[in-house]
Image: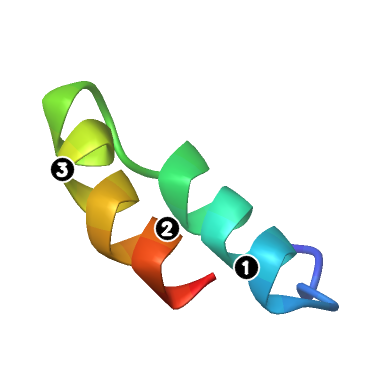
Amino acid sequence: RVVPTSRHEFIHLMLQEVDGEEGVVLLRPLQDIS
């Protein structure tokens, strides 16, 4: 697995591991962080 070099990449990798509606739910707080 590639090590994320930034918070944005880390979030992107996390979202890739999430399926369907859960991804949408996680996007809201993650957008607030970024």
**Tag 2 secondary structure:** helix
In the picture provided, is 10 more to the left or to the right than 17? right
**In the rendering, at what x and y percent does residue 21 appear?**
14, 26
Decide: is 19 above or below 28.
above
- For the point 47% across and 56% down, the residue is 14
Mark positioned earlier in the residue sequence (3 or 1): 1
Q: In the rendering, which numbered label is found on residue 18? A: none
Q: Choose mark 2 or mark 1, whichever is in front.
A: 2
Q: Which residue is mark 1?
A: 10
Q: In the rendering, which numbered label is found on residue 25? A: 3
In the picture provided, is 25 more to the left or to the right than 31? left
**The residue positioned farthest toward the front in the image shown:** 32
* C-alpha span from label 2 to label 1: 13 Å
Neighbor class of circle 2 (other Cα within 10 Å; few <14, some 14-19, many 20+) is: few
**In the rendering, at what x and y percent does residue 20 appear?**
22, 21
- Type of the residue with mark 1: Phe
**Tag 1 secondary structure:** helix
Q: Which residue is mark 2?
A: 31
Neighbor class of circle 1 (other Cα within 10 Å; few <14, some 14-19, many 20+) is: some
Decide: is 16 above or below 1.
above
In the picture provided, is 29 more to the left or to the right than 34? left
**The residue positioned farthest toward the top in the image shown:** 20
- Type of the residue with mark 3: Val
Question: Looking at the figure, which quarter contains the C terminus?
Answer: bottom right
Mark positioned earlier in the residue sequence (2 or 1): 1
